[in-house]
Image: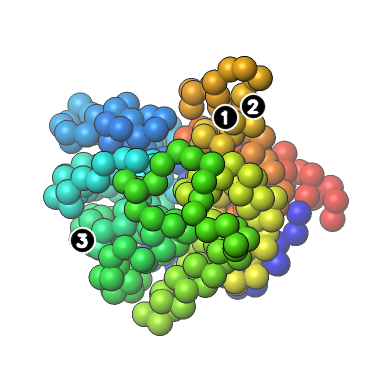
Amino acid sequence: MTNSIDSNRYRLDCAGKILDLSTPAIMGVVNLTPDSFFDGGVYGSTGNEAQLERALESAMAMVHAGAEIIDVGGESTRPGADPVSTEEEIRRTVPFIELLRKRSGVLISIDTYKAEVANKALLAGANIVNDISGFSFDPAMPEVCARHQSGVVLMHTPARPDSLRWSQETGAKDEEVMSRVTSFLRRSVELATSYGIESIVLDPGLGFGKSVEENYRLLARLDELHELGWPVLAGLSRKSFLGQAIRRPGEDAPPPSERLFATISANTIALMNGADILRVHDVKAAVEARAIVLATRRASE
């Protein structure tokens, strides 16, 4: 349960706010979308005052439960999701970010792979850009992040969300998954640092274009990603491959609403295997899992 990362990189300057990763951080998810796999439509997507207030209440509850980061999304990135326009994504997210920034000093992350959305969100008060493409979809994204001196989360994905499907197949068969992910993220880091970006977090993209077995292999070897020299984020919350593991023989995998206990178990394993950030829908459960892992870590030192 040790972390090999250089201790100087536990404190990331994210557009003027410090993300302190001397202990793992919890990132709470607020999806302002009608079609996200777990909480789609909970807060609506039209941006009217009542819906914004409901989303704000949820975000503040996450902060009070212990979330250090709120991750705001305006487009579903689940496999097979239809893309939305840049304008619609801005309309869904920017008013909420402005409102949250007025109410709270919490770190805010914008979950987008579009540079224009990221720019508007950072101007509205966001601190981190969570790019599922690892800077591979929009060539303008590195410059935007560098100009705002934002933090960045660089994730591995083999394709755009609308091209991904729930499948056991992953395409490449001759290359081991950890090697594929590490090579991809190394290129993303090289691109980011070439623009002078200094606050970087890496995400292996659990659930994105990997087989069930590959996801568990990545989870088991999560700490190896620290060899790239940066903190690591694990996004496991209620994902399909968790459902496959807890599926009863002869039955379908349980839906996302029934994957909380599996998520808690997976989050605990991720923390024990070196995760520096957990991206979750259920903040209180993640905070308590973190407390147990940290207590165990202290007792073993």
Say whether residue 235 is visible: no
Which residue is the extreme one toward the top? 250
Q: What's the residue type where badge 3 is placed? A: Glu
Q: What's the residue type where badge 2 is placed? A: Ile
Tell which of 174 and 135 is nearer to you: 174
In the depicted structure, whether residue 12 falls above or below residue 101: below
Q: Pointer 3: residues within 10 angstroms few (<14), some, or many (20+)?
A: some
Query: Residue at the spot x=59%, y=31% of the render?
Result: 244
Q: Quadrant of the N terminus?
A: bottom right
Q: What's the residue type where badge 1 is placed? A: Gly
Specify whether 289 is left or right of 167. Answer: right
Q: Which residue is labeled 3 in the image?
A: 116
In the depicted structure, whether residue 17 falls above or below residue 228: above
> Secondary structure under badge 1?
helix
Q: Quadrant of the C terminus?
A: bottom right
> Secondary structure under badge 3?
helix
> Secondary structure under badge 2?
helix
Query: Residue at the spot x=36%, y=66% of the render?
Result: 136
Are circles 1 and 2 on residues that touch, CB within 8 Å?
yes
Query: Residue at the spot x=20%, y=61% of the render?
Result: 116
Q: Which residue is labeled 1 in the image?
A: 243
How far, Cα to Cα, is label 1 from label 2?
5 Å
Q: Which residue is labeled 2 in the image?
A: 246
Tell which of 292 and 35 is nearer to you: 35
In the depicted structure, whether residue 72 falls above or below residue 132: above
Tell which of 278 and 157 is nearer to you: 157
Are circles 1 and 3 on residues that touch, CB within 8 Å?
no
